[in-house]
Image (cartoon, rainbow, N blue to C red):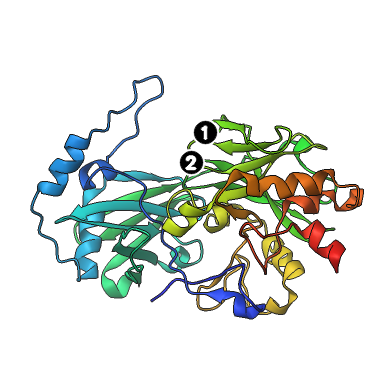
């Protein structure tokens, strides 16, 4: 089974559907023992030291695992976890990685918002190949009672997954009380939900009902897990994360920073820093709000998507209104749009969103500029 998504940047509307595994490339440098370590360090403790010695020692070990048997691999992954784990990303993926005889494998167990109510989880794993090699198709399965896997809800945001003799409680990230400050929202903005990206950065997903566009606004109600520094373009309003490469625009009209770019190499590597498009706030979507926002942008999906923006085959509509940049100079287009006298004031917010269809590379143009040209 392949997990697919409706991806931006392709020709046609429903032809936007692009095969893409709902997996993430592991962005770790240690072997399995450290990749699935049982507990996070407490605040105030020194950082954990990561050494090349440990990495090489893990690679040098001879391991035995029937990698072509998905249930054996699932038993290994589940059995390697402690009795309770925390799932940080808001689309409920629990990511893992391990090295097997010199080959890195990665994947995730997804406590899917829809499938968990049916007593099922999604299990994915694949060879974590470098960008210059063709992607491994990997294995993606929906596991439930027929495979001997059980999923039990023990709290509103906690599920016990059991297989064979091992049970693990997956505690989902409770962001139910997280809301954007009033100063971060424009009059026509609708808050869809909070996002915790696998990069460790939190956003607010916002839909502008008048302009029919999405924004990811940096959540600054907590200290961001990055340091954002001014880019070499513009007047200091374009900021880039020194760890993530996420590019933000410090709004001229409101107290907020809008995501305008992610580093293209991270998108190609499909790693933890490839952008928040695959971490929708599934646990916190109120009613039909997200589906209606998508239909406002893409009305031809009416009757085809559920409240999570998924089609019957688990294809998801991708919300990625940002650029995939290679050089910070490419981001200057957003500042030129925001300061242009040719852009009406009521279209200002459209300077920070790219269209669903069309280019998202260096030649991309914000919606405000595109619609002006039509």
The quarter of the picture where the N terminus appears is bottom left
Q: Is residue 65 visible?
A: yes
Looking at the rendered structure, which numbered label has been put on residue 174?
none
Residue at mark 1: 226
Instruction: Classify mark 2: helix, strand or loop.
Output: loop
The percent coordinates of residue 179 (x first, y second) are: 67, 40
* Viewer-proximal residue among 124 and 75: 124
Do the numbered discs 2 and 1 sit on residues whose CB atoms are within 8 Å? Answer: yes
Residue at mark 2: 200
Residue depicted at 38% across the width and 50% down the height: 170
Q: Is residue 296 left or right of residue 152?
A: right
Residue depicted at 22% across the width and 49% down the height: 80
The percent coordinates of residue 49 (x first, y second) are: 28, 28
Crowd around label 1: few <14 · some 14–19 · many ≥20 (10 Å): some
Residue at the outermost left position: 62
Q: Is residue 166 visible?
A: no
Residue depicted at 52% across the width and 54% down the height: 264
Residue 275 vertical placement versus 222 (above, below): below
């Amino acid at each position: 089974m392949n997990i697919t998504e409706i991806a931006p940047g392709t020709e046609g509307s429903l032809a936007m559907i692009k095969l893409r595994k709902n997996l993430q490339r592991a962005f770790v440098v240690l072997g399995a023992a450290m990749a699935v370590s049982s507990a996070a360090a407490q605040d105030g403790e020194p950082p954990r030291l990561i050494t090349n010695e440990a990495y090489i020692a893990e690679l040098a070990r001879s391991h035995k695992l029937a990698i072509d048997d998905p249930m054996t691999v699932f038993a290994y992954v589940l059995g390697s976890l402690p009795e309770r784990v925390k799932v940080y990303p808001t689309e409920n993926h629990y990511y893992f990685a391990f090295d097997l005889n010199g080959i890195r494998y990665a994947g995730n167990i997804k406590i899917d918002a829809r499938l968990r109510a049916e007593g099922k989880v999604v299990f994915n794993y694949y060879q974590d190949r470098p960008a210059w090699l063709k992607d491994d198709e990997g294995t993606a399965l929906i596991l439930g009672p027929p495979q001997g896997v059980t999923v039990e809800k023990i709290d509103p945001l906690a599920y016990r997954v059991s297989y064979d003799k091992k049970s693990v409680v997956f505690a989902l990230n409770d962001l139910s009380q997280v809301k954007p400050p009033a100063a971060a929202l424009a009059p026509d903005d609708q808050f869809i939900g909070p996002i915790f990206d696998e990069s460790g950065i939190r956003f607010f997903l916002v839909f502008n009902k008048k302009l029919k566009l999405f924004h990811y606004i940096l959540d600054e109600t907590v200290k961001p897990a990055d340091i954002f520094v001014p880019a070499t373009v513009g007047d200091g309003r374009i900021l880039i994360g020194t760890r993530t490469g996420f590019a933000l625009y410090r709004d001229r009209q409101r107290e907020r920073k809008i995501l305008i770019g992610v580093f293209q190499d991270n998108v190609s590597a499909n790693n933890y820093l490839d952008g928040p498009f695959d971490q929708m706030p599934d646990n916190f979507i109120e009613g039909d709000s997200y589906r209606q926002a998508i239909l406002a942008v893409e009305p031809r999906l009416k009757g085809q998507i559920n409240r999570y923006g998924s089609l019957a085959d688990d294809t998801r509509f991708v919300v990625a209104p940002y650029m995939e940049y290679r050089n910070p100079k490419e981001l200057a287009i957003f500042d030129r749009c925001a300061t242009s006298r040719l852009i009406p004031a009521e279209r200002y917010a459209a300077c920070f969103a790219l269209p669903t269809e069309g280019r998202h590379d260096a030649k991309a143009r914000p919606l405000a500029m595109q619609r002006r040209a039509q």
